[in-house]
Every structure is written in structure tokens, then in C-alpha cells.
Image (cartoon, grey):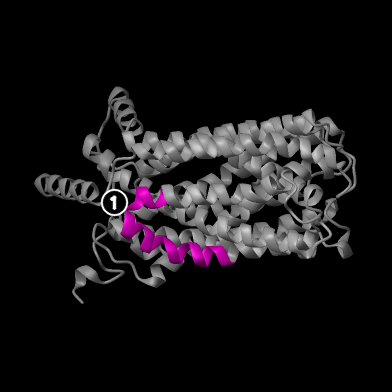
Amino acid sequence: MSKARTADDADGATARLSVRSKTFYGIGSVAFGVSILGLSSAVLQPYLNRVIGLPALWVGTAIMLTLMLDAFIDPAVGQWSDKLRTKWGRRHPFMYASAPLVAAACIGFWNAPTDWPKEALGVYLIGMLVLLRICVSLYEVPSQALAPELTSDYHQRTSLFSYRFFFGVIGGFGMNVVLYQFFLSPQNGGILNREAYGHYGILAAVVMAISILVSAIGTHHHIPRLAVPPQRQVKLSQLLREIGVTLSNRSLVVVMISGLCSGIATGMTGALSQYFYLELWGLTASHISYLALASVLASFAGIAITGPASRAWGKKNAMIGLFGVATTTAALPILLRLLGLMPPNSSPWVFTILWIDAFVATTLAIGGFIIISSMIADVVEDAAVATGVRSEGLLFAANGLLPKFTAGIGVFLSGVLLTVVAFPVDAAAGSAPPEVMRHLALIYLPLTFAVNTLSILVLIFYRIDKDTHERNVATLEAAATMAE
């Protein structure tokens, strides 16, 4: 094998990364998976509402506002990391610094004071939630931006993001099992035990810090061959023009609009999932953790189908197909319950059907998310052809901007729905009236299915295929050669 094809010595534009390099890069997403679980509305909404006792509308509004603020923080971090010049490159200083900050913020959030008035406690928790999201962004945005720097190969990028999503799912699943099977088990006080969430926060902090450091150290040796921003004096007007051209890239705009639509559904689904699990399906904490096992197995299956699907149909068509079937599959159980076609909750078939459905839907969704992340990486060169500047951090942050806005809106809407159907805040787990849950499902299902479908249809207008990407890479290489 020639030197140009070896894993760790290859030029960044043509690198075929080794399994070792992909693994170290992917391990960092364990932290993201843990944070996704802890910061997900599926955990936050019931924790702040039913455990802490804050009104559902307060909680939905707070989560929405913190997500929107986070949407402004991410592009700032991305642009900062794009322009940074240090002996440790552009991304690694952020990755190293984020580890202790994430740990401290995580512990502070989940171990809130127990004797404060409700209003003061609400302000404290919102402030800590904002801080925790900022600290996670300090790692996640530069880490995502590192991927297109490690390789510009069209299919290698898909493989690299497969590792990222795999470890992210493993991290989220592992903490899900620990949270529901141990900390929130009936023996430890059940799913509404406040003290257990505090213990979970300490463990989550340690796991996130370790995974971030392992990934940063494991990819450190790639720094010498990563892209280095040119030293130049740029007027503010020119900088704003470059940012504007980058963010107006047609394919990026298409993906962002798609994310805008799906973010609403994601926010609502996440915020209401535990309500449906406990009240509509009558599941226990153990059942919920076993459902998470489907996500782990689905991560293997999703990675297995992603590469072949992308190579056979192209990234855009593969993603549209995978997300389309996933959306339909995910909606089936609630639809069947509304139609009276699901077995009663006393039947073991209910959990079996939910588990199979979760496995299939998650397999397809993971495949779609891997491919769409690879599609965003391909926008890097497409935008650079127009601006002459690589802006990986800005692009990945911008892609996450609208979904965070709309995920926050989705969480807010879930709080509105809970208020509209008069969900009883003080009810014990599993005791909500059936007519309340049916009313909730009748509003939730058509709304989320409609916005998910719209998010898929928008992607028809994405225009970067393999040939386009390779032309962009060749154009940038030719420009770099002339500059030398």
C-alpha cells in the first residue's frame, strides 16, 4: 500500500482512515449520547415537571428558550474554531477545555438545591441548563467539524460518521440502562425519585469527561495534517459576505429547512415519549430501558445498511428512503391503538410490538442521520469553492441551528398539549385517565407525522452528488496548487 493510502500518514484530502482512527474519533460521541439522554425532553420534561414540580408550561417554555439560546451559541463556537490558529490546531483546544467544564455543569444541574422556593429553583435550573448546553457545544461543534478535515473522500465520510453515531447510541443506551434499571428502579425509589437523578448526574459527568478526553488524545496525532486557516486581515464587511455566501449555499439551506421541520416533531416526540410509555402503554422503568436495547442493536443494523444504501442509490435518495420508512414505522403503534387494533396493555404482545417497532424505526433513522451528516460534510467543499474559505465549524453549527429552535418549539408545544388535555401533574406514574391520553394522541400523531413528511420532501432539492463533490475537491486542490 502506498503512503498516500495509509491510514494515519495520508494527506487529509485523500485519507483512508484506519479503524483505530475512526474508533478514537467516534468514542467522543459517547459524551454526546449521554448528553442527549440527559438533555432530552424525554427526561427533562418529566423531571422538571413531575419530580421537581414546575408547571408543564413553565418547563416547556424554559426548554424552548434554552434551546434557542444554544442555537446562537453553536455558530459562534463554530466560527471561532474555524479561525483559531494554535499548535494544537483549530478543534482540539476546544475539545480538551470542554471536558472539565461539561462535568462541572452536569453535576451542578442534576444536584439542585432542595430547600429553595419554587421560583428561585426554576431560575437556578434554567441557568444551569444553559451553562450545560454551552459546555456541550464547546466539544460537539469542533468535534463534528473535525470529521471533514480527517478525510474528504465521499464514502469515507459516511463510514466515519457511522462510527460517530454508533458510539453516540452506545453512550445514550448505556446511561439509559443505568438510569432506569438502577437509579430509578423500584428498589431505589422509582421513576420519580429526585435523589436518584442527582446520583445519575455525577456518573454522567464522569463518563462524558472521560470520553471527550479519550477522543481528543486519540485523534491528536492527526493535527499536523489538518487544514490551517490562512493568516489574513479581513474587513468586517468581507467576513460577513463570506459567512453569508456560506450559509446561503443551496444544499445547506435545503438541509436546514428539512431540519427545521423535523425538529418540531423531534422536540414533541422526545418530550412526550415518557408520558406515552408510562400512561398509554403502561410500561415500567425496566421496560423503558429494555426498549433502549433496541436502539443499540439498531445502531449495528443502521451502520450495516448505511454504506450499501449510500453507494447503491446515492446519499440523497438513500436518506429520503430511509427516513420515509422510519417516519411511517414510528407512527404505527399509536395509530393502531387509536384504531383499536393493538392488544390491551395486559398482553405481553404490547411490549413485543413496541420493541420491534423501535428497532426497525431506529435502524432506518440512524442510517438516515449518518448519511445526512455526511451530506453536510460535502457542503464544506461546495461552499469553499464559492468563498475560498473552509468553514466546517460554521456549517455544522448552522445545520444544527434551526433544528434547535424548532426542537425547542416542539418541546414548548408538548407543554401546551399537556395543558390543553389537562394532564394531571400530581398523578402517580401510570394513573393518568385513558381519555386524557387518547386526546393527547389524537393531536400529537397527525401533527408530528405531517412535519416529518414535509422534512423529507424538502430534501429532493439537495444537489450535491458524488460527481459534484469530486469536482469541488479537484477545484480546491488546483487552487491550492496555484497559490503555492
Question: What SS does tag 1 mark?
Answer: loop
Q: Residue at x 18, y 74 (%)?
A: 2
Q: Amino acid at mark 1?
A: Ala
Main SS type for the magenta part?
Answer: helix
User: Does residue 320 appear to the left or right of 362 in the view shown?
Assistant: left
- Verify whether residue 314 appears in magenta: yes
Residue 206 seen from this side: yes
Residue at numbered disc 1 = 227
Rendered image quadrant of residue 3:
bottom left
Residue 210 seen from this side: no
Q: Residue at x 62, y 58 (%)?
A: 357
Whole-percent x and y of residue 55?
81, 32
Whole-percent x and y of residue 238?
27, 26
* Above or below, comparing residue 186 to residue 192 in the picture: below
Q: Where does the magenta region start and end? A: 297-319
Q: Residue at x 69, y 40 (%)?
A: 128
Whole-percent x and y of residue 274?
74, 48
